[in-house]
Image (cartoon, rainbow, N blue to C red):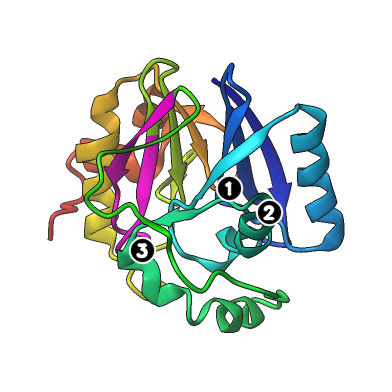
Amino acid sequence: MKIARLVFNPIQENTYIIWDSTLKAAIIDAGNMTERENEVIEKFIADNGLTPEVIINTHGHFDHLLGVAHLCERYEAPFAMSKKDEFLLANASASAELFGVRGGAMPEKIDIDLDGRESISFGETELKIIATPGHTPGHIALYEPQSKVLFTGDTLFRESIGRTDLPGGDYSWIMRSIIDNLLPLGDDVKIYPGHGDDSNIGHESMYNPFVVEVLNQEVNYKN
């Protein structure tokens, strides 16, 4: 599986294009918002001969939704996200404006509900779906076991974690998601977050202050 990261919009959101030998592709967290950014992602797809089969979101915050409607229409691809985050779609444009971002067209519905689903596929690749609530109620991570690659969205960043002070956020749940669902995947699993640089589980277990304080039992994250 091949991975490309494109950084879009004023929130500096990571949009990932992933594909395999079939040249079928998935786009994760499409944050492109301007005509120029649309041209950048479309040129990359065309230059590499890719066919996007599905547009997947780890969660429903506006900065990860900005390019979804455009790409779904452009490539006639379905939109996949947990319906537990569907409530965020209606207010996505208003949320963008609160952060000084021009929202534009946002997706109005989810075509493939990832809530409770074990995996989603494109080409010859199967991505495991891991529920990671906390940043939002319906947040998920996407794991490809053969490559040992994990797309963590806004749950786990390099040496940080996602905010839990936004609607639907919960500190206890995000730490449960990280400690119970992500760390057991193994130290050598590489993580690709929704913002910032990539990392791996081993690094975060050692140097992420939010994770370390829980592992050292300095914080009771379950209460």
Residue 12: mark in rendering: 2
Amino acid under disc 2: Gln
Q: Is residue 204 left or right of residue 76?
A: left
| Element under disc 3 | loop
Mark 1 / mark 3, whichever is N-terminal: 3
Residue lying farthest left? 223
Mark 1 / mark 2, whichever is N-terminal: 2
Q: Is residue 182 left or right of residue 28?
A: left
What range is drawn magenta here? 125-142
User: Where is mark 1, residue-wise?
Assistant: 195
Q: Residue at x 23, y 56 (%)?
A: 173
Amino acid under disc 3: Thr
| Element under disc 1 | loop
Q: Is 15 in the magenta? A: no
Q: Position of residue 60 (x, y in %)?
A: 46, 64
User: Where is mark 3, residue-wise?
Assistant: 136
Q: Identify which residue, 79 or 223, lies in the foreground.
A: 79
Establish if 208 lies above or below 55: above
| Element under disc 2 | loop
Separation of disc 2 and disc 3 at Cα?
19 Å
Mark 2 / mark 3, whichever is N-terminal: 2
Establish if 201 lies above or below 194: above
Q: Are marks 1 and 2 in contact (CB under 8 Å)?
A: yes
Q: Identify which residue, 25 or 133, lies in the foreground.
A: 25
Establish if 153 lies above or below 2: below
Separation of disc 1 and disc 2 at Cα?
7 Å
Q: Position of residue 155 (x, y in %)?
A: 40, 49
